[in-house]
Image: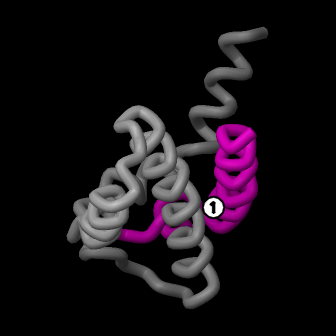
């Protein structure tokens, strides 16, 4: 049963992992590092905040591509084109719930 649930959640996150694997310009990371230059948050806490922000950002990218009907993101087919609309739609709130879970 546990393995089946693990497989289910991995499958549910496929649209998220598809978009997360794409190369980025690292613009957000540079901004985050700039803020931390002044805030001096401990590195482990800083990385946790960065990871949470990244998860939320990727979920918004999936939603944006879906709503705009975008077919390609950075030259790669978008999540809803690869995995289908229902799968992409279900991944969005799941990732947001994971973000909220990590914030608590």
| Residue sitting at x 74%, y 57% | 93
| Residue sitting at x 55%, y 87% | 69
Residue found farthest to the bottom: 68
Q: Which residue is mark 1?
A: 88
For the N terminus, the quadrant is: top right
Give the dominant element type of the magenta stretch: helix, strand or loop.
helix
Vertical order, 25 against 83 (above or below)? below
Q: Please tell me in which quadrant of the rendered image residue 62 appears.
A: bottom right
Q: Mark 1 packing: few (<14 Cα in 10 Å), some, or many (20+)?
A: many
What span is colored magenta in the figure? Answer: 76-104
Work out whether residue 1 or residue 103 is closer to the camera in this orientation and state it: 103
Q: Position of residue 41 (x, y in %)?
A: 41, 46
Q: Is residue 14 magenta?
A: no
Q: What secondary structure is found at the residue carrying circle 1?
A: helix
For the C terminus, the quadrant is: top right
Q: How is the image coloured?
A: one colour
Q: Position of residue 84 (x, y in %)?
A: 60, 63
Q: Is residue 103 magenta?
A: yes
Q: Is any part of residue 50 visible from this angle?
A: yes
Work out whether residue 20 or residue 33 is closer to the camera in this orientation and state it: 33
| Residue sitting at x 64%, y 43% | 12
Q: Please tell me in which quadrant of the rendered image residue 38 appears.
A: bottom left
| Residue sitting at x 35%, y 37% | 43
Vertical order, 23 against 4 (above or below)? below
User: In the visual, does 94 lie left or right of 80?
Assistant: right
Q: Position of residue 40 (x, y in %)?
A: 36, 49
Q: Is any part of residue 76 visible from this angle?
A: no
Number of labelled discs?
1
User: In the visual, does 60 lie left or right of 82?
Assistant: right
């Amino acid at each position: 049963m546990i393995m089946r649930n693990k497989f289910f959640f991995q499958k549910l996150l496929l649209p998220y992992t598809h978009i997360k694997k794409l190369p980025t310009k690292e613009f957000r990371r540079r901004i985050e590092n700039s803020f931390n230059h002044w805030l001096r948050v401990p590195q482990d806490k800083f990385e946790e905040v960065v990871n949470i922000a990244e998860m939320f950002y990727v979920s918004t990218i999936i939603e944006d591509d879906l709503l705009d009907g975008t077919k390609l993101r950075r030259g790669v087919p978008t999540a809803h084109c690869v995995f289908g609309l229902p799968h992409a739609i279900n991944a969005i709130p799941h990732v947001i719930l994971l973000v909220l879970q990590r914030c608590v």
